[in-house]
Amino acid sequence: MTESQAHTSAMTDSDALYRQLVQNITDHAIYMLDPEGMVLSWNEGARAFKGYCADDIVGQHFSCFYTLEERHLGIPLQGLAAARMHGRHEAEGWRLRKDGSAFWASVAIDAIVDQGELIGFAKITRDITQKRAHQQEVLEARDAAEQQSRELSGLYAFLHTVIHNIPTRVMVEDLANGRLLLCNHDIQTPQPGARTLLSYLPPDALLARIKDELPPAHAGPSREIKLKLDTREGTCRLKCRTLAIIDNGQATGQRLYLIDDVTEEHTAQATIHHMAHHDALTNLPNRLLFGERTRALLEALEPDITQVGMLLLDLDDFKNINDVLGHQVGDELLCQLATRLHQHLHHGETLARIGGDEFALLVPKAHDDATLSMLASTLVTSARAPFQLSEHRVQTGISLGGVRASRDIDSFEQLMRCADLALYEAKRQNKGRYEAFRPELAQLARARLDLENDLRGALAQNALFLLYQPIYDITGTRTTGFKALMRWRHPVRGIVSPLEFIPIAENSGLILEIGAWALVEACREASRWPDDQRISVNLSPAQFKRQALVDEVAHALAITGITPSRLELEITESILLDASQHNIEILHQLKQLGVRIVLDDFGTGYSSLHYLGSFPFDRLKIDQSFIREMCDSREALAIVRAVTGMGKSLEMEVTAEGVERREQMALLQQEGCSHLQGFLLGRPGCPTDIAPAEDDQKEAASTTPHDAI
């Protein structure tokens, strides 16, 4: 064998050995490509990785191992081009197996050149799916760690900002040596958001003060204490909570202090408490505080409570003052009264405003009835002095009712009830006075309640009826109409005076039903009279509080058929004072029905002249008190003369009521009064029975009952 043959044989054997070695490698896919990318060879590793046998793939284009998307993008050919240009191309990406599954491959393509000419490519592919997954896990872990680091850094910055700007002072103490490990407020430069009285307290001094309040052996997990400290900026109230710092269930030997400045909260609570127990206008104790003090005093003095006294008082005619002069003036009057009453209290009394114009006085040293009576008399006298209210000078008074505690009257509620009964009696007797409670007042109250209950059934039982008093022209010879007067025939008591049951009807609301009935009954009776005879019916202030009044009058006219101009509705000045604008509007609506409006008891109220100009009344009635005194009093005569003069000027009829003597009648004729009403001309009765009374009867009658409705 020649040397050349030997060399060729060795090369052949070496190539065969190399091919065998490549074919048997199983952890790499190694195969050859021709210059166009067609597969020329296929090793065992390629079969294991990709699932293709050599017969399946040799002769196929190597792009079949790429995804459809990569093939559309030309990535396989780009790899060959790169290897051709640079001699080697490396890349990673998803590759496909025969069964369609994907794996992450590391690919190296080497260009094979012989004598300067490209004869093919060697391609080595490794399955690095697990390696890549591990790398991804490492990268994700690194990213997570970096993210956690950033979050912790942000959280630290956040907590640092919060801790150093919240009003709460946060301190951490090392219990071993008492050293402060943390204090969020710099005493020299407190943060703007935390600049409170607390900010000016030195941390060491504050900690020492707190520890003084803690029990010596305090080692519990938490505790809350309250402190009151005086600083150069003012009094500071603190709330401090202490917490033992625990780490993994073990105490660290450190204690956390959370300290809040609750000065404003304490002040606000004190203000709220004061407002809940005091009257906003006068700053006096209110009913709640008055009751608390009364109960506390009774409990402290039990069983010797007889020295405890109570007075209830209210202003006389306050509503009229309030309505005429305005609520601002009324409020000023209440404040001045409270100040004036306080000037006479020197023995621990409690003065309270319990509502409206009603005041209450707790007297802890009312040793006897005379002591309570003398104090009440002093207050009555003081309240009579004029009050200067802005530009108004007002003179009024107070009525008082009083009671002393006893074995039978031993609670706040009983004292209030008894004092209220006494106050009711004082106002009933003529106001501006003091009445002491006595047991019969409770009996009278019970009787009023019984009378109210009886009154509720009076309408259904036909126990109410009307009498009619004639109204004459000024000559006294011709009647122009009649005034309807209410009466009650009680099954036990007989005829009950309207002075007794009308106030009860008004207070209970029964006056609404009674008034509606009286309108219909009076109009029905008048429908039987001649057309020139009018019927006058009183209206109660309570009836003006609802719009139904206009409908009730229209209903009475409709069902009885009388001409509206024959119906006169008499009102008092109190109706004009009570919600005056609303009531004036109702009067205009009544006027539109065609009825006549009469102002009764003229001259006894507060705003007559004002309302004479604001509403066209058809008739004025001079109150009987002026008629009774006109013959003996120049002042009463002057008032009668003024009223008749205004009536003529305003073209209003003027009726004098309560005419009982001939000289009164003569004087009224001389002054130009247009109509007369009174016992001299006729007493209330059935219309067919009314006749002038005899002279001796006229002289004997000195008063006329004041009938409402």
Image (tube, rainbow, N blue to C red):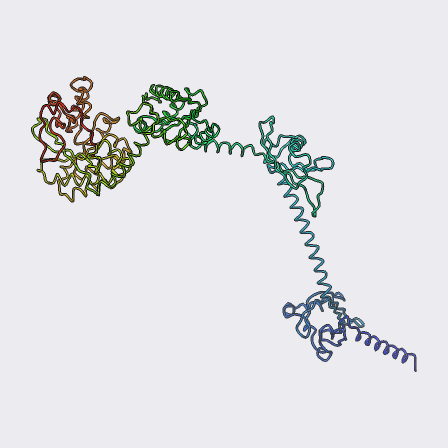
Residue 308 placement (x, y as % from top left): 43, 26
Q: How many marks?
A: 0
> Considering depth in this image, is 199 or 152 the residue closer to the camera?
199
> Considering depth in this image, is 708 or 268 the residue closer to the camera?
708
Q: Is residue 569 left or right of residue 314?
A: left
> Considering depth in this image, is 202 or 188 the residue closer to the camera?
202
User: Residue 689 occupies which quadrant of the picture?
Assistant: top left
Residue 522 placement (x, y as % from top left): 16, 38
Residue 688 placement (x, y as % from top left): 9, 36
Query: The N terminus is located in which quarter?
Result: bottom right
Q: Is residue 671 visible?
A: no
Query: The C terminus is located in which quarter?
Result: top left
Q: Residue furthest left?
A: 477
Residue 575 placement (x, y as % from top left): 25, 32
Tell me the residue at 23%/27% (across/down): 608
Figure check: 346 above or below 121: above
Figure check: 18 above or below 708: below
Q: Residue furthest bottom?
A: 1
Q: Is residue 473 visible?
A: yes
Figure check: 690 above or below 60: above
User: Residue 548 occupies which quadrant of the picture?
Assistant: top left
> Considering depth in this image, is 572 or 663 the residue closer to the camera?
663
